[in-house]
Amino acid sequence: MKKINIIIVDDHLLFSQALESLISDIEEYNVIAVLNSGKEVVDYFSGNNKKPDVILMDIQMPIMNGIEATKWLKSNHPEVRVLALSMECEEDTIIKMLRAGARGYLLKDIHPSILKHAINEVYTTGIFYTEDIANTLLNSVNSSKKNTPIPLKEKELQFLKLTCTEMTYKQIAEKMFLSPKTIDHYREVLFEKLNVKTRIGLVLYAIKEKIVKL
């Protein structure tokens, strides 16, 4: 059985050591490196080192943070799948990490069984997220809707794509030459159409339906 090669990137020594011990106890996983910053990720890939299948990436790190490191990996090693593992739960941070190229986002207080499931999903299907992070029920839409594309108007689609950027809603309104009130209307319409409750939900829907690319 091929093992999934994993790199842990976290500047908190006790956490990274505990995580390494936890993952190493799982037969199908192989921890090939534990790194302390995004800069060490770049250095690792610059050397003649074994490439990982999945990287567990913290966000707040010195020298080069997880968002910057994930962007670098997306540009230079897009085959490597990054799974964010962080204490950060702010909507803006999550969106930035997903846009940087992360294939999933987990909080550090998750149960080990969820971590294992997330690693397997990211490795096999390419993406994983939890309801806690998304605050949405993308996987709970009733079966009759799962395989049915949801029609979006041109302006709604444009708004959805811009929602996946780092722009604020006010900046999106200016970009689309619309009033903030009209943008609020588009947002509420999409919340209803896509059965989501937050901007993160909109981003995840766009990624899942390949409206935007990781």
Image (cartoon, grey):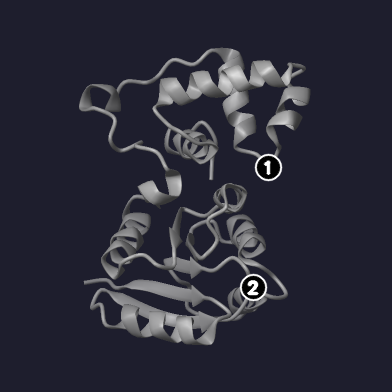
User: Distance from label 1 to label 2 (Cα)?
Assistant: 20 Å
Estimate how packed mark 2 is, as few (under 14), some (14 to 19) or many (20 or more) residues with alpha carbons within 10 Å.
some
- Helix, strand or loop at disc 2? loop
- Amino acid beneath label 1: Glu
Estimate how packed mark 1 is, as few (under 14), some (14 to 19) or many (20 or more) residues with alpha carbons within 10 Å.
some
Q: Is residue 156 above or below residue 48?
A: above
Q: Nearer the viewer, residue 46 or 195?
A: 195
Asked whether, in this view, residue 66 is left or right of residue 25, the answer is right
Q: Residue at x 47, y 37 (%)?
A: 201
Task: Report the number of numbered marks.
Answer: 2
Q: Which mark is residue 61?
A: 2
Q: Position of residue 206 (x, y in %)?
A: 49, 34
Q: Nearer the viewer, residue 108 or 24?
A: 108
Q: Residue at x 30, y 62 (%)?
A: 114
The quadrant of the rendering that contains the N terminus is bottom left
- Amino acid beneath label 2: Met
Q: Is residue 32 above or below residue 210?
A: below
The answer, for residue 126, to whether it is visible in the render is no
Q: Position of residue 101 (x, y in %)?
A: 56, 52
Query: Seen from this angle, which residue lies furthest front?
Result: 181
- Whichever of labels 1 and 2 marks the residue nearer the N terminus, that label is 2
Q: Which mark is residue 166?
A: 1
Q: Residue at x 68, y 18 (%)?
A: 181
